[in-house]
Image (cartoon, helix red, strand yellow):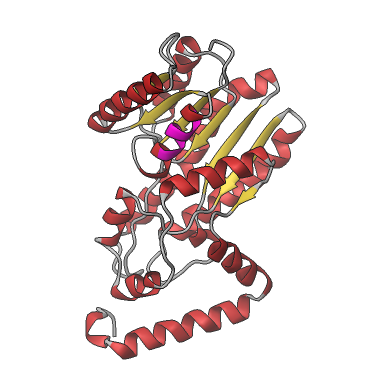
């Protein structure tokens, strides 16, 4: 047990992060989850311990749940030190914390753009710096960052979220080049809409057009995303895009950007023509 690999999952108390934490436990990892919500932290801690017990992983400690806000670098550094002290050297970091705040571009408060960058982009930088430092010192490990399909296919309603997630891809590509020769692998995940509590909260703010665009895309379950993420990490893929439709969208947007814009514009026209009264913009 003491020689089992150790993983950290930020945003691990719900959604994709929770699914990844449970899947990593199932695969023999000792897992530390980081959550900013005290109530959810306690809940996932109980769930992880119960799951570990069912797997026969009782001692030494196989899981840990810590409270830290990814927007606060000092809190993450403290969490990283606690993980190293209580579990040991971390070999895998999955930074899954993040959230989207959609809305019409001319109606979103300016502060929302700042908040989205602080949470989704700077939160990624903080996690990489806090947990990646020890990996670089040891010369081994894997860092998994989370972007979004919206980063390579920005759509109606995501003018604050999409740029923040695009910044994550650019950052991951940069550190991939810098860290590779130091023994640390970097990955970036671009999941589509996934059936999570975060998506439910996001849907409360989506413009009508955005909701309609999302309807035909379908949803992935977080457990399936978790499996595809870990498969991509195992195979050494830098860019991990779960789901066949998302892979097709990535290929289309990359190789035929003009056609992609044409198709999106046509779809939005159809939506607005079908029920213009539900759109709050002229």
Q: Residue furthest bottom?
A: 273
22 in magenta:
yes
Seen in the picture, residue 109 relative to 118 is either above or below; the reply is: below
Q: Residue at x 33, y 90 (%)?
A: 273
Left or right: 104 with respect to 2?
Answer: left
The quadrant where residue 13 appears: top left
Q: Quadrant of the C terminus?
A: bottom left
Left or right: 270 with respect to 205?
Answer: right
Q: Residue furthest right?
A: 181
The quadrant where residue 141 appears: top right
Question: Overall secondary structure of the magenta stretch?
Answer: helix
Towards the viewer: 191 or 101: 191
- Image coords of residue 103 (percent x, y): 32, 65
Q: Residue at x 37, y 44 (%)?
A: 15
- Image coords of residue 5 (percent x, y): 57, 21
- Image coords of residue 29 (percent x, y): 52, 24
Which residues are drawn in magenta? Answer: 19-24
Q: Residue at x 36, y 28 (%)?
A: 68
Left or right: 39 with respect to 160?
Answer: left
165 in magenta:
no
């Amino acid at each position: 047990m003491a020689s089992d690999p150790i993983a950290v999952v930020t945003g691990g108390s719900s959604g994709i992060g929770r699914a990844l934490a449970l899947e990593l436990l199932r695969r023999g990892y000792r897992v530390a989850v980081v959550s900013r919500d005290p109530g959810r932290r306690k809940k996932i801690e109980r769930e992880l311990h119960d799951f570990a017990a069912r797997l026969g992983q009782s001692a030494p400690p196989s899981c840990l749940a810590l409270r830290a806000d990814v927007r606060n670098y000092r809190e993450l550094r403290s969490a990283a030190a606690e993980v190293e002290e209580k579990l040991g050297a971390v070999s895998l970091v999955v930074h899954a914390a993040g959230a989207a705040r959609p809305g019409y571009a001319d109606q979103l408060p300016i502060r929302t753009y700042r908040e989205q960058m602080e949470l989704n982009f700077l939160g990624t930088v903080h996690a990489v710096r806090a947990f990646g430092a020890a990996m670089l010192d040891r010369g081994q490990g894997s860092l998994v960052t989370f972007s979004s399909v919206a980063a390579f296919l920005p759509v109606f309603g995501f003018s604050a979220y999409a740029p923040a997630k695009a910044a994550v891809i650019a950052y991951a590509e940069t550190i991939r080049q810098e860290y590779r020769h130091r023994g640390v692998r970097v990955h970036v995940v671009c999941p589509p809409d996934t059936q999570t509590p975060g998506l439910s909260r996001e849907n409360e703010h989506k413009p009508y057009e955005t909701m309609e665009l999302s309807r035909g895309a379908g949803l992935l379950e977080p457990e399936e995303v978790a499996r595809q993420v870990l498969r991509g990490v195992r195979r050494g893929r830098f860019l991990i895009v779960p789901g066949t439709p998302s892979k097709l969208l990535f290929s289309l947007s990359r190789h035929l950007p003009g056609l992609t814009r044409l198709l999106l514009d046509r779809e939005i026209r159809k939506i607005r023509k079908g029920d213009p009264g539900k759109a709050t913009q002229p």
